[in-house]
Image (spheres, grey):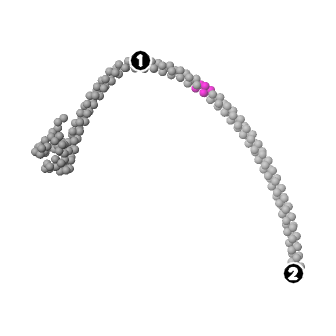
Amino acid sequence: MIHQLTDIRGIGVSTAEKLGEYGIGSVNVLLKGGEKKLCKVPGFGAARAAKVVASAEALIAGDTLVNQVRVGAKKAAGQVKAGAKKAAKATGKVAKQAAKDGKKFAKTAKREGKKIAKAAVKAEKQAEKEAKKLAKSAEKGLKQAEKEGKKLAKAAEKGLKQAGKEAKKLAKATERKAKKIAKVAAKEAKKAAKAIKKKTK
């Protein structure tokens, strides 16, 4: 697509005429000369020249993109047509094969469904048996625990009584020893007192 200088942003008719006076009569010439050539034109500094060049490049890039899109669209349209023809031919075969596969799948599904149903029934019965066994085991365990608890309680009671008896025996023995020690201490005290009296005389 051929563009005029006025298609570039920032360039009006009068500016385009001025550029023509300096040998810049088209977008392509402007891009070839670049910013250096633009800066020679009165009214164009470095910043303005850079903006104008960037706008011109964007303009050309837009044309390139449009052309690429058009070419791509044509190719895509051709590919779609070819694919549609192939699909039309293959649709009949695919449909027949799909029907066959569907029947096979349905039969297989029925078989698997029956197997699963049987397995579920067996599993349910097995679970009931296991539950009954566990219930019986739990009941036996509870009874056994009760018996053991009673035994332990009796043993603890006996141990407590025995401990009480032993404590009483120890208390009596300790009391006897204490009395003996007290008597001995009293005798020793009397002897010591007599000895002291004799020495004082």
Residue under the point 28% across and 28% down: 75
Residue 200 circle label: 2
Q: Earlier in the sequence, mark 2 or mark 1?
A: 1
- Disc 1, SS: helix
The answer to whether residue 14 of the structure is visible from this angle is no
Residue 32 circle label: none
Count numbered badges in the picture. Answer: 2
How far from the left and from the top, in percent, is residue 110? 52, 20
Q: Residues within 10 Å of mark 2 (few under 14, many from 20)?
A: few
Using the image as rendered, state which of residue 109 and residue 11 is in the foreground: 11
How far from the left and from the top, in percent, is residue 100? 45, 18
Where does the C terminus fall, quadrant-wise?
bottom right
Q: Locate residue 144 relative to residue 112 in the image: left or right.
A: right
Q: Locate residue 49 relative to residue 142 in the image: left or right.
A: left
For discs 2 and 1, the disc positioned in front in the rendered view:
1
Of all residues, the one furthest to the front in this rendering is 32
Highlighted magenta segment, given as a residue range:
120-125
Q: Locate residue 117 relative to residue 32 in the image: left or right.
A: right
Tell me if residue 194 comes above or below residue 14 in the rendering. Answer: below
Q: Main secondary structure of the magenta part?
A: helix
Picture quadrant where residue 195 is located: bottom right
The answer to whether residue 35 of the structure is visible from this angle is yes
Residue under the point 69% across and 33% down: 136
Please say if the residues under marks 2 and 1 sit with CB atoms less than 8 Å apart. no
Mark 2–mark 1 distance (CA, rounded to whole Å): 143 Å
Task: Look at label 2 and name its amino acid.
Answer: Thr
Picture quadrant where residue 5 is located: top left
Task: Look at label 1 and name its amino acid.
Answer: Lys
- Disc 2, SS: helix
Would residue 108 be counted in the magenta stretch?
A: no
Residue under label 1, please give it.
Answer: 96
